[in-house]
Amino acid sequence: MDQEVISIDISKLVLWTENPRDPIDADAKDQDIVNRALEDNALKWTLPKLAKEMGDYFDFSELPTVVYHGDRPVVYDGNRRIILGKIKHGLVTIPKGTTLNIPDFPKDIPCNVCIEKIALNNVLRKHSDSGSWQPLERDVFLHKFMGREKTAFLILEEDTGIISANKHLNQRFVKEEIFKEDALKSMGFVISNGHLHSVHADNEGQSILSDISRKIKSDTISTRKNRGKVLEVLDLASQQLIEQNKSKKAHLSKFKFSLEPKMTGSRLTKRTDARPAELFGGKLYLKIGDVSNLYRDICDLYSFYISKKNELSQSFPSLIRMSLRLLCETASKDKRKKLEDYIKEYADNAKSKLDQDLKTTLANQNVRPESLLQLLQTGAHNYQSSASMDQTIAMSVLIGSILTVTHGKDE
């Protein structure tokens, strides 16, 4: 028969490692999956909530869906309930202090035992549009198990890791309106032969995608705001890159966003994030004078912003951006040079003195020696395009290094 109800001892039931809710390494054991579900960093399992919702007893009307892989009965649907049962019967362990009010649970569980095709159809029908899966999980399931073509959303993730690295991007609005083929093409990205191609250099492409990610995270673009205006919300520097590269030939993209480590059998130590960039890249030691005084004033302004940013408008960072222009003009006059000549003479050498983390900060925000002057000029005249604090900090890092070269105490 293609499907029938059979009672199976809960100790023999095997949790599904490829559960679209939160897939894990294929060699993982039940205990590994339980550990992951209890840790629940992405809030996909919510076992305490399920235990409470189950009430005082196991509901036999909700049968787990099981497929035999040889002699192993694998649970395709109902993994959360089976985890609670395994905990209840002491078949897996949980950390001390963990409280789960699990109802009475039978040891023999009536299961819908069926062929894999039926099991997959059941899983898709019950979870695809219920809200328990996010768009990326749905796309993975449809491609891997149902034979559907990869979506642009899935290809973008596979080739760059951007969605795994930025959880706020894993939403239907982003998939259907921003990371769709025509919108990606307008930004200089082309889906071809199942891979992401780009007219931009890798660091430029990563910078543009980082920019759109920030705009989504900050709700600059959302279902209620700037809808359909993907290009318009990007920083001016990103728009300029898109315009200047639009006639170039697309090539295979080879950049990756930082990913969270996967669980592969036991709990892993949480990754230590790279150190965040500070304003000016850290404290500067400058010669006494107007440049040093203005530098300290800007640091005080930034400290005020940090302490009050929840009360300030989204345009406040533009004030810091404008002050960077004033700082550079003051420094250039001190050297009896035009601002353009000052930046041109010292910026390349200043960038070479930065460590790799800070150079990466510059690249991610599209801040380069040759773009710095334009960014400063734009910031002085257009507060909307200069309201990105991340890019402002990146600019300050390069400016800080320039000032150290031209006005450092050792100079």
Image (cartoon, rainbow, N blue to C red):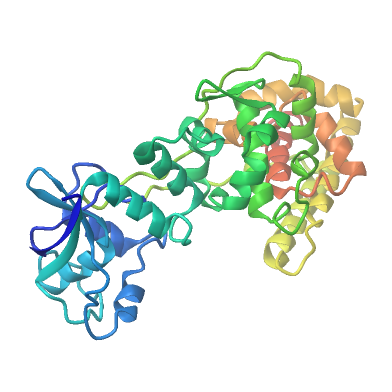
Residue 246's spot in the image, x, y percent?
Answer: 75, 21
Measuring 63% from the left and 21% from the top, which residue is drawn there? 201
- The image quarter in which residue 233 lies: top right
Q: Residue furthest bottom?
A: 56
Q: Nearer the viewer, residue 292 or 73?
A: 73
* Nearer to the camera, 225 or 11: 11
Q: Position of residue 119 (x, y in %)?
A: 28, 51
User: In which quadrant of the rendered view does residue 399 lie?
Assistant: top right
Q: Nearer the viewer, residue 4 or 48?
A: 4
Residue 190 x, y percent position in the rendering: 62, 25
Q: Is residue 30 left or right of residue 228?
A: left
Q: Which of the 4 quarters of the picture holds residue 291?
A: top right
Relative to 340, 281 lies left or right: left
Q: Tally the marks.
A: 0
In the displayed structure image, the side of residue 119 where residue 285 appears, left or right: right
Residue at coordinates 87% horizontally, 31% vertically from top-left? 332
Counting from the top left corner in percent of width and height, residue 42 is at: 42, 58
Q: Is residue 80 visible?
A: yes
Residue 46, relative to residue 287: is it above or below?
below
Please, is residue 287 above or below residue 203 in the view? below
Residue 284 visible, this angle: no
Instruction: Tell me the quadrant of the picture where the C terminus can be found.
Output: top right
Residue at the far top in the pictured view: 249
Q: Is residue 43 left or right of residue 59?
A: right
Q: Residue at x 33, y 45 (%)?
A: 262
